[in-house]
Image (tube, grey):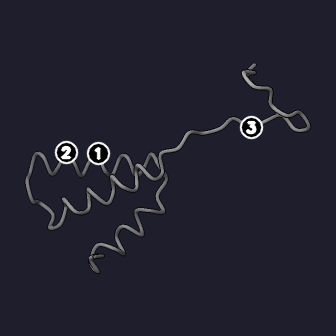
């Protein structure tokens, strides 16, 4: 069941880029470990942020040269 207090927050966090989302998650985690329960529902927020991090974690593909299909095993780095 979706918590009505946390869903707008997680929707906002879902629009962040991966590095910012990772930094926010790391800072919240460290603060939660050092100062337990400093923010209400921080554990639920961290679970949502972890889910967003895993969903946004994808391999970046290198662009293919125009007009030339990639060959298996060929690297496009020069």
The residue at the far top in this view is 78
Which of the 4 image quarters holds residue 67?
top right
Left or right, 50 with reference to 72: left
Q: How far apart are marks 1 and 3 (CA)?
A: 31 Å
Horizontal and vertical percent for residue 1? 28, 76
Secondary structure type for disc 1: helix
Q: Mark 1 points at which residue?
A: 26
Comparing marks 2 and 3, which lies closer to the viewer? 3
Q: Mark 2 points at which residue?
A: 30
Horizontal and vertical percent for residue 22? 38, 47
Question: In the image, is residue 23 above or below residue 39?
Answer: above
Q: How crowded is mark 1: few (under 14 residues within 10 Å), some or many (20 or more)?
A: some
Callout 1–callout 2 Cβ contact below 8 Å: yes
Q: Which of marks 1 and 3 is nearer the N terminus?
A: 1
Secondary structure type for disc 2: helix
Secondary structure type for disc 3: loop
Left or right, 65 with reference to 19: right
13 or 56, which lies in front? 56
Question: In the image, is residue 30 above or below residue 14?
Answer: above
Q: Which residue is drawn at 47% across and 45% down?
A: 57
Q: Name the residue under label 3.
A: 63
The residue at the far bottom in this view is 4
Q: Which of marks 2 and 3 is nearer the N terminus?
A: 2
């Amino acid at each position: 069941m979706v918590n009505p207090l946390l869903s707008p927050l997680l929707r906002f966090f879902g629009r962040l880029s991966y590095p910012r989302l990772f930094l926010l998650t790391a800072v919240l985690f460290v603060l939660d470990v050092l100062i337990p329960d400093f923010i209400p529902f921080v554990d639920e927020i961290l679970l949502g942020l972890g889910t967003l991090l895993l969903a946004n974690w994808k391999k970046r593909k290198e662009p293919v040269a125009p007009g030339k299909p990639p060959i298996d095993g060929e690297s496009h780095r020069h």
